[in-house]
Image (cartoon, rainbow, N blue to C red):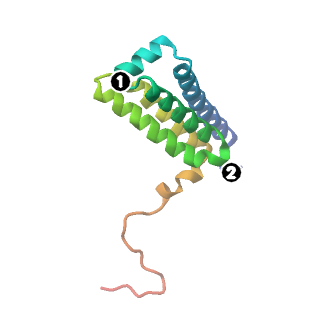
Amino acid sequence: MKNPSIGGVRRGAGTILVFLAGLVLIGSATAKLAQVPVVVSQMDALGFAGNKLMIIAALEILSAVLFLVPRTRPFGVLMVSAYMGGAISAHMGHNEPVYQPAIILVLAWLGARLRHPEYFSAFNRNTSGASQLKSSEPARA
């Protein structure tokens, strides 16, 4: 789905950010599935050990794949947002820095915004709630 209203540089930057965020998520999930000792100990400290770790890894891969496939990207943005929001919450709950999941979340949203501005068209509408007078209605004093 091409959007002719966005420029090539913007489209390219968005594509790069989308794939960067997706690859980071897949790499993180792969480290969890491969049981990399550092990752396992970090996740254990957050309360995600054993089967919980595998579920987290599966959700991370699912989110990344949905985000990387253009047809499912709108749902993928939501899934990545939910997943990274949970990661931020888990880190905050254990007094750990939240910059890593926050950066990935920002990359995902920025990439999606640059690549697919139509996903965010609701933010461009007038949502003030004030009704506008139609030109055929007389103005009241």
Of the 4 image quadrants, the one containing the C terminus is bottom left
The spot of residue 100 in percent (x, y) is 43, 24
Q: Residues within 10 Å of mark 1 (few under 14, many from 20)?
A: some
Q: Amino acid at mark 2?
A: Asn
Q: Is residue 79 above or below residue 54?
A: below
The spot of residue 62 in percent (x, y) is 57, 37
Q: Residues within 10 Å of mark 2 (few under 14, many from 20)?
A: few
Q: Which mark is residue 3?
A: 2
Q: Is residue 48 above or below residue 111?
A: above
Q: Which residue is located at x 44 percent, y 41 percent?
A: 82
Q: Are marks 2 and 1 in contact (CB under 8 Å)?
A: no
Q: Nearer the viewer, mark 2 or mark 1?
A: 1
Between 5 and 135, the one lying in front of the other is 5
Residue 61 lies in quadrant: top right
**For the residue labelled by badge 2, is the local secondary structure a helix, a strand or a loop?**
loop
Q: Amino acid at mark 1?
A: Leu
Q: Which residue is located at x 40 percent, y 31 percent?
A: 87
> Seen in the image, is 82 located left or right of residue 1?
left
**For the residue labelled by badge 1, is the local secondary structure a helix, a strand or a loop?**
loop
Q: Residue furthest front?
A: 51
The spot of residue 48 in percent (x, y) is 40, 26
Mark 2 or mark 1, earlier in chain: 2
> Seen in the image, is 43 located left or right of residue 95?
right
What residue is shown with label 1? 46
Disc 2 to disc 1, C-alpha distance: 41 Å
Between 21 and 11, the one lying in front of the other is 21
Q: Which mark is residue 14?
A: none
Q: Which residue is located at x 62 percent, y 43 percent?
A: 115
Q: Which residue is located at x 47 percent, y 35 percent?
A: 106
